[in-house]
Image (cartoon, grey):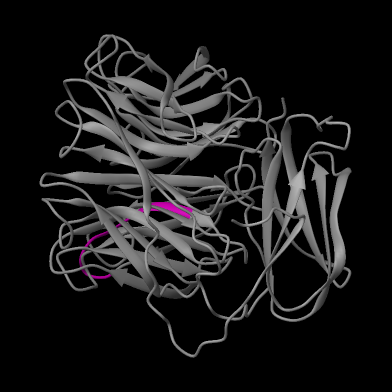
Amino acid sequence: MQTKILIVFVCIILSTQIMAQTPPDTLWTRTFGGSSGDYAKSVQQTSDGGYIIGGWTFSYGAGEGDFWLLKTNANGDSLWSNTFGGIESEDAYSVQQSSDGGYIIAGETYSYGAGEGDFWLLKTNANGDSLWSNTFGGSDRDYAKSVQQTTDGGYIIAGYTYCYGAGFDILLIKTDENGDSLWTRTFGGGLDDEANSAQQTFDGGYIIAGETKSYGSGGYDFWLIKTDENGNEIWNETFGGSGSEQAKSVQQTSDGGFVIAGYTTSYGAGLSDVWLIKTDENGNEIWNSTFGGSDYENARSVQQTTNGGYIITGYTKSYGEGEADFWLIKTNANGDSLWSKTFGGIECDDAYSVQQTSEDGYIIAGQTYSFGTGESDIWLIKLEGQVGVEDNSIPISINLHQNHPNPFNPTTSISFSIPEESAVDISVYNIKGQKVKSLVKDSFESGNHSVVWNSKDDTGKSVSSGVYFFKLNLNGVTNQIRKCILISD
């Protein structure tokens, strides 16, 4: 068992080659569903150590399909679930715990709004009860695929629209904390262009990933778009070959660049392969890696892990037990595979979301046709944490990693990597730029390290819920800043 202390040093073992490693063991799996089809598209660890799952259900609710929000405890046991929808169909693709302890959900609705399908943004309290909802769209089809709370307490939503332009265009919408639109932006050309993932960047702007048929080299190409805080384009880059490529997930990495995951039919070993691309802060490719066999593979979700590597999930038809299996891939910081693992039965099982958990394990969500009670069920899988460092290389750059868990209450771990001995200062600030707490101020040797922020003082009093920033200063110079969400009691 790992002893909890304020500063945790991680030993680095020198190696001249990439060593394959044993995947972590599965701790438990859970299925949720009724007699019809039920689907999970997003999962996140919550501040109480449990999990929130967003998707949709044909088994329950008022219409042909409803948003389905499920809350579990740390063992994956259901605490509550709520459905949202009208007489037609609703599909939820993205869920996040917000700074007030409730949840924000985004997807599309065919029951409400102005057109054939509209963006649907729905806010709940901590018990999953609806507080408000807003629709966005025109007279035709609009699909929301991603939502994230922003530093001002509002939300950024990304998807695509058929209401403007010659085909589908990327649609980016910024709202205030009540879900009222502040601005909208579209991106696209004469053919179909779609967004699947977006997040706020360290500079207050936004990064969007999806696919474009209007630009690039092939049928569809990865499309990466960087905007300023008002949604105005700063740059865009395409990636792809003569076949088709679709980007499903993007995250800004600790070095300020970006990692993108999806699939490619232009490169790799099979009919389609998982494709992972790492870029710098300007969208210039640093490296790319493909993963797959002779059949079809697709990545749905990617996240940078606390050791600087990456965790990817999606499905594989080349490996596993059935028609398609959940596929989990762990890489080092250079995109080299360290291990992979499949989960599934004799039918089709498809993973959509993965997140590293507070104890360095992993939570995966998707849908299974092999197990459960109905046509398809939500499938939640928890993997144990791994002791030690998975990437056995000395850091070559300064990296302040995203804290985890995030959101958190009352403690969270903040990891950082430094290539040489340095004077390290890590402090926490509120959104007004006022220092809340100094976490560490000391000299550290080269390597990977972490510090724990306990938001409660010695009397048990916590700083208030909200968005905070933690800043890494090395040798008196500010290097990197990250955002986190605290949900206090």
The residue lying toward the viewer, choosing from 357 and 75, is 75
Position of residue 252 in the picture relative to residue 146 (left or right): right
User: Is 385 left, or right, of 300 in this rendering?
Assistant: right
**Where residue 307 sits in the image (x, y, percent)?**
57, 66
Question: For the point 56% across and 50% down, which residue is it?
Answer: 359
Rendered view: 257 above or below 29:
below
Image: 146 above or below 8: above
Q: Indicate whether residue 245 is drawn in magenta.
A: yes
* Residue closer to the observer: 353 or 363: 363
Q: Quadrant of residue 244?
A: bottom left
Q: How many marks?
A: 0
Q: Nearer the viewer, residue 4 or 340?
A: 4
Residue 92, quarter of picture = top left
* Extreme residue in the front direction: 1
Q: Residue at x 66, y 53 (%)?
A: 202
Question: Where residue 110 appears, x then y in whole percent?
Answer: 29, 19
Q: Is residue 51 above or below residue 303?
A: above
- Residue 180 vertical placement versus 41 (above, below): above
Dividing the picture into quarters, in which one does residue 368 lie? Answer: top left
Residue at the limit of the structure toward the bottom, as seen here: 16
Question: In the picture, which quadrant includes the C terminus?
Answer: top right
Query: Please, what is the dominant secondary structure of the magenta stretch?
Result: strand
Picture coordinates of residue 360 (x, y %)? 53, 54
Is-magenta flag for residue 105?
Answer: no
Q: Which stretch appears magenta?
A: 241-250
User: What percent of the width, then of the height, locates residue 280?
Assistant: 55, 69
Describe residue 446's horizontal placement relative to residue 84 as left or right.
right
